[in-house]
Image: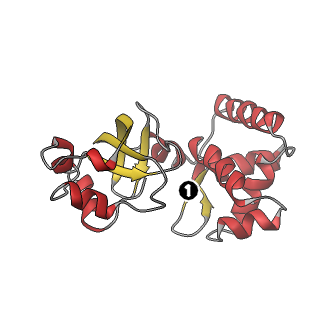
Amino acid sequence: MLFAGSDRDGVADGRITVAYRRWAEPRVVEGRVYRTNAGRIEIDSIREVNPELIADTDADVRLADRQNARDVRRRLRGDESLPTFLIRFHLVSGPDPREELASQSELSSADLADLQERLARFDALSNHGPWTLQTLQLIENTPAVRAGDLAASVGRETAPFKLDVRKLKNLGLTYSLEVGYRISPRGAAYLDATRSE
């Protein structure tokens, strides 16, 4: 989830704990932690609501930092035929475990074996063949390049390519940049280990 303008500041300081989104289907899952441009948030609940039934007195209107129900409806983005979701969340404090993992520049033999097993599983479950090593090498050699351009360079569609890169990021192997990606210290250590085998 992304937050614009004053919403970003309100989420970051814990003042905003509710968001309304117009989506074709839910994009967040209750109980999961998501990284946003305002910090990490954990989803407390998500449910579909009828925007026409939102009332000025609803507590969620204030928790979303909206003046009234009309302000909620006015700020909804996207096709009006799409469902509207009410998302309640809270800010998660403390360091991001993925960032700590990504910053590790040395791999133990157990770390290496675990990564090899996980990546082999990703490759085996893929419907487009092995991709993990190729993708890591691509990001290493072409940092800060648009995901769409990277995907096209290996003959892939952008959306599934980005999902695959997110899997690598969850293992601490890559960083997301404003544009594109780069290899993390942990990812560099893994690639060094594959080259020395």
Q: Is residue 83 above or below residue 118?
A: below
Q: Residues within 10 Å of mark 1 (few under 14, many from 20)?
A: many
In percent of the image, x 32 and y 49: which residue is there?
51
Horizontal and vertical percent for residue 138? 75, 61
Q: Is residue 89 above or below residue 137?
A: above
Horizontal and vertical percent for residue 154? 83, 62
View extreme (left): residue: 57
Left or right position of 61 against 122: left
In percent of the image, x 79 and y 66: which residue is there?
152
Horizontal and vertical percent for residue 106? 60, 44
Left or right position of 131 against 32: right
In percent of the image, x 60 and y 53: which residue is there?
174
Question: Splitting the image into 4 quarters, where does residue 73 fall?
Answer: bottom left
In percent of the image, x 83 and y 34: which residue is there?
124
Left or right position of 46 against 111: left
Q: Is residue 171 above or below residue 185?
A: above
Which amino acid type is shown beneath numbered disc 1? Tyr
Left or right position of 164 against 39: right
Frontmost residue, 197 versus 33: 33
